[in-house]
Image (tube, rainbow, N blue to C red):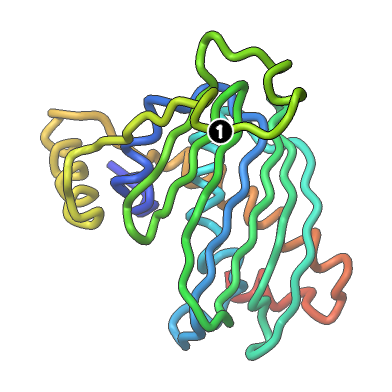
Amino acid sequence: MVQIGHIERFNRAVRAALPHVKKPRFIDSERLAPFSPRGSDVAVVLDLMIHDIDLLLTLVGAGARDISAVGVPVLTPMLDIANARVTFTSGAVANITSSRISRERKRKIRIFQQREYLSLDLAAGTGEFYRLKPDFDPATIRSGPTDIAAFVDRVKLHAPDGEPLKLELESFVSALKGEAPVVVTGEEGRLALGVALRIVKEIELTLPSLVGHAHHHA
C-alpha cells in the first residue's frame, strides 16, 4: 500500500475549505520560505511547489492542460524561485509562486469561483469564505460606493483541530487496517510530480544552463 506524503491535504484550512469548493475558476497560490540547505539539491518546484500542485489538482478536480513558467537560480545552481501559470482541462487557471529565498514565510491560497471567494492561510491553518448574498443586485454597486458587507455573506470555515503530520500518519494506519481509503494515492502523487516536471521543463526552455541539473537531481 502506498500513500504519498502531501501533508497539506491534512491542513486544517484545507479540510475546512473543501466542502465549499465547487468549480474554481482562478486560484492564486503563494509559498515563500527563508533559505534552508534542506532540499536545496533539487529545484524549488520539486521541493516546495509540489505541495501546492497537489492541492490545485485536488481543488480543481481536473488535469493540467497548458503550462507556462519562469524561474531563476539565485543561491544554488538549482531553481530557487519559480512562478507557473497552469490552465486545467476544466478551464480553471492557477497562478503558483514558490520561493526558498524569502525573508518571510508565507503559505496562502486564494480560490475564486462563481459568486464566491475563499482565502486560506495554510501556515496558520485558518481561512475565510465569502459569497454574494442570494438577493444581490449588481446595479447597487454601479450606483456608487457601498459597504461590501451589504451584499456579501461571510461563512465561518470550520474543521476539527489536528496536527497535520499526526493526521497523515493516522490516516495511513487506518488505510492499512482497511478502515479508510488512502487519502493521497500513488497515482495522485504521480500526477502532481508530472505537472512539477513539466513546469521545470518549461523553465529550462528559458534557462538552457539548467538543462540536466533538475532531472539529474530529481
> To which quarter of the image does residue 132 belong?
top right
Depth check, front residue: 15 or 205: 15
Depth check, front residue: 169 or 127: 127
Residue appearing at x 64%, y 89% in the figure: 76
Residue 59 sits above or below residue 46 on the image: above
The residue that label 1 is drawn on is 148
Residue 48 at x, y percent in the picture? 51, 65
Residue appearing at x 56%, y 38% in the figure: 111
Residue appearing at x 19%, y 29% in the figure: 180
Residue 162 sits above or below residue 140 on the image: below
211 left or right, relative to 80:
right
The crowd level at tag 1 (other Cα within 10 Å; few <14, some 14-19, many 20+) is few
> To which quarter of the image does residue 148 belong?
top right
Q: Quadrant of the N terminus?
A: top left
Residue 75 sits above or below residue 73 on the image: below
Q: Quadrant of the C terminus?
A: bottom right
Depth check, front residue: 215 or 16: 16
